[in-house]
Image (cartoon, rainbow, N blue to C red):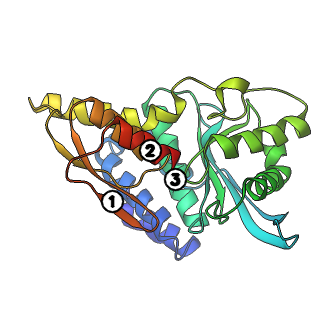
Amino acid sequence: MDINNIMSALEAKHPGEKEYLQAVKEVLLCVKDVYNQHPEFERNKIIERMVEPDRIFTFRVTWIDDKGEVQNNIGYRVQFNNAIGPYKGGIRFHASVNLSILKFLGFEQTFKNALTTLPMGGAKGGSDFSPRGKSDREIMRFCQAFILELWRNLGPDQDVPAGDIGVGGREVGYMYGMYKKLSRECTGTFTGKGLSFGGSRIRPEATGFGALYFVQSILDAQKDDIKGKTIAVSGFGNVAWGAALKATELGAKVVTISGPDGYIYDKDGLDAEKIAYMLEL
C-alpha cells in the first residue's frame, strides 16, 4: 500500500474535505503493516474501494416555520459500505454539518460496526438544520420534510439510521412516524425510538455508559480505579449526560459539563440531583 499515492488521488478528487481526508489517512497508517502482509488485498484494490462511499444522496429540505415562512436546508445521506450488512449510522442535525464530516463519520462507522461484530455496514446522514431555538412543531415539520426526501433509500434490509448530535428520541419519533406513513410498514428502520413504539431500554444512556465502561477497563488494565478520579466532560448531550451519570455512579467526581454557550465548572462535582436538574433544563 502506497499511502501517499492513495491520499494524493483522494485529495485530487475531494479537495477541501479535511475531516474525511484526515480520517482516511489515520486509518491507513494504522492498518498499513497488516494490509501489506496480504497481497490479495492489494491485487483486489480493497483499500481503494473502502475509502470511497458506495453512494451519497444530497437533497433540498424545504419546510415552513411557525411564522409561515419557507425555509430551506440541505440534507445528506452517505451510504459508505454495506459489505457485511445493511447500512447503519446516525443522522446529525447541526449548523456545522457538511459532506466532509459525514463522509468521515460514515467511513469510521464501517469499522466501528465490524469491530464490534455487528453485522451491519457504515453510513451517516444529516442536515445543516439546527434544532436549537426551534419549536417542537418546527422540528416536526423539518423532520417530516427530511424523511419525505430520503425514505425510499431506507429500510431494515437497506439502511437503518439512528440519532446523533441534535437528533434524540423526539426527532427520531418524528422521522420514524413519517417513514411509517410513507412506507406503510412498521419495521425496525430506525434505532433510538421511544420505548412505547419499539425502542430499547437504556438506549439513551447506552453510549455514555459504554464510554465509561471503556475507561474503567483501561484503568483496570493499569491496576488503577476510576473511584476518586476527577473528570472533565465535554458537552451534555446524547452521550455526555450518560457519561457524567455513570462516572458519578462509579465514584468519580465530574467537575465540568458544557454546551454551545460555554461551560459549567462545579468544584464539588455533579450528583444525581444536579444531573436530573440539567436533564430537565
Which tag, 1 or 2, sits closer to the chain's start? 1
Mark 1 or mark 2, which is nearer to you?
Answer: 2
Residue tagged by mark 2? 277
* Mark 3 in CB contact with mark 1 (< 8 angstroms): no
Earlier along the polypeptide chain: callout 2 or callout 3?
A: 3
What residue is shown at x 23% (from left), y 31% (from top)? 216
Mark 2–mark 3 Cα distance, whole angstroms, equals: 32 Å
| Number of other residues with Cα within 10 Å of mark 2, as a class: few under 14, some 14 to 19, many 20 or more | few
Give the Cα separation between the discs numbered 1 and 2. 14 Å
Residue 120's disc is none
SS of the residue at dot 1?
Answer: strand
Residue 8 drawn at (x, y percent): 45, 71
Locate residue 164, reporting x and y percent: 56, 48
Alpha carbon of mark 3 to alpha carbon of mark 1: how far?
Answer: 28 Å
Q: Which residue is mark 1?
A: 264
Q: Secondary structure at mark 3?
A: helix
Write down the residue under mark 3.
Answer: 105
Q: Nearer the viewer, residue 123 or 92?
A: 92
